Image (tube, coloured by chain):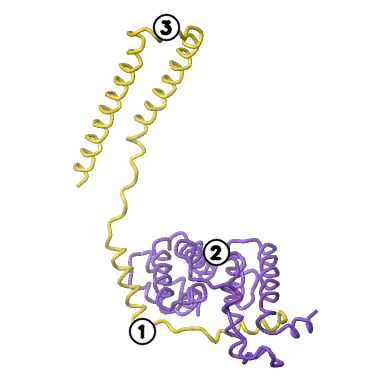
Chain colours: A yellow, B purple
Amino acid sequence: MTDDEIDRILASGHDDILPTSGFVESVMEAVRDEALRPPPIPFPWKRALPGLAAAGVALVWVLVVGITQLGPAAEAPQLTLRLPSALAPILDAAAWTVAALLLTLASVKLSMRFVTRRT
Amino acid sequence: MSAAEDQADVERVLSGDISAFEGIVRRWQSPLVNLAYRFCRDRGRAEDMAQEAFLRAYRFLDKWRRDAAFSPWLFALAANLYRSELRRIPVGTVSIDEVAEPKDPGAPDGGLEQEDRDRAVRGAVFALPPKYREALILFYFHDMDIPAAARSLGLPEGTLKARLFRGRDMLRRKLARVLGAPRLEEVQ
């Protein structure tokens, strides 16, 4: 089979179809629905920026604290075997969890307030 | 189809007259539905995909750069949508070996009537890997216009030519079994 034959067959368009009679109406109905839909609410970058900056600073601080604490811990691993020292990481984790929950609650409350103010 | 009409309708839609979009749909419904049909071979799905393409065109109408013609922008948008739609839900493809069975393989023409041969070739395109299939579909849809097909696919012309060459080569080799070996020998 030559390229010319393939060209002839595939370019012939014998299998072209006609759109159904209601196609234009169907598209226009979808377009009208689309036009009536309210535009999506843009992300409030201006309001989120201080929070994002704070989160960035907190992340850097956690990394710095973590790295500085890793050094002595590696040098004296026997200290972690004592009971008060074993409890310390758990209490530390609990404190961070509570802080994260409070932050989540605050952000939810804040966004709810923005939304109710807008509507 | 007039570029001036497209331009005028787009201006009216962008200024708030949604009904002007109907002119665009009427002018381009047949090409867009047929392009979709060549991608999926399913009339119902072709209309659904074409409707989604028009809807997307409406949403992004303000992104059309006026220094270029409207139709290449519309075809590129539609082709892009059809390709991702078929990647999401692929067409039920068949193996190229199952495309057509000769009625009488011993006959000089391999046992296939002209119509069967045409159907076998069209069906065989669907058994090609997507990148070659898409290249062939767009190339023949644009009346073998390489620059137009390359624009619709968002590919450099050289890449499209390479895919067309490879796609045709795969078609020829695979169809040789179905359409009869003597014809392939004639070519070589």
Horizontal and vertical percent position of residue B124: 60, 76
**x, y percent for residue B19:** 33, 73
> Mark 1 — residue?
A21
A4 over A43 or under it: above or below: below
SS at badge 3: helix
Q: Quadrant of residue B12?
A: bottom left
Q: Position of residue B65 (x, y in %)?
A: 51, 61
Cα separation, mark 1 vs mark 2, equals: 33 Å
Out of A36 and A2, give the one closest to the viewer: A2
Q: Earlier in the sequence, mark 3 or mark 1?
A: 1
Q: Are marks 2 and 3 in contact (CB under 8 Å)?
A: no
At label 1, counting other C-alpha atoms closer than 10 Å, the crowd grade (few under 14, some 14-19, many 20 or more) is: few
- Residue B141, percent across and down? 57, 76
Q: Which residue is mark 3?
A: A79
Establish if B171 lies above or below A109. below
- Which of the two marks, 3 or 1, is nearer to us in this view? 3
Q: Label for residue B134?
A: none
Q: Can marks 2 and 3 be said to lie on one chain?
A: no
Q: Which residue is mark 2?
A: B67
Q: Amino acid at mark 1?
A: Ser
Q: Is residue A103 left or right of residue A69?
A: left
Question: What distance separates the C-alpha of mark 3 from that of mark 1?
Answer: 82 Å
Q: In the image, what residue occupies the spot 40% across and 9% down?
A: A81
Q: Do badges 3 and 1 share one subunit?
A: yes
Q: Identify which amino acid the numbered label 3 is placed on.
A: Leu
User: Please, which chain is the residue tagged with disc 3 on?
Assistant: A
Residue at image coords 39%, 28%: A53
Helix, strand or loop at mark 1: loop
Q: Chain of mark 1?
A: A
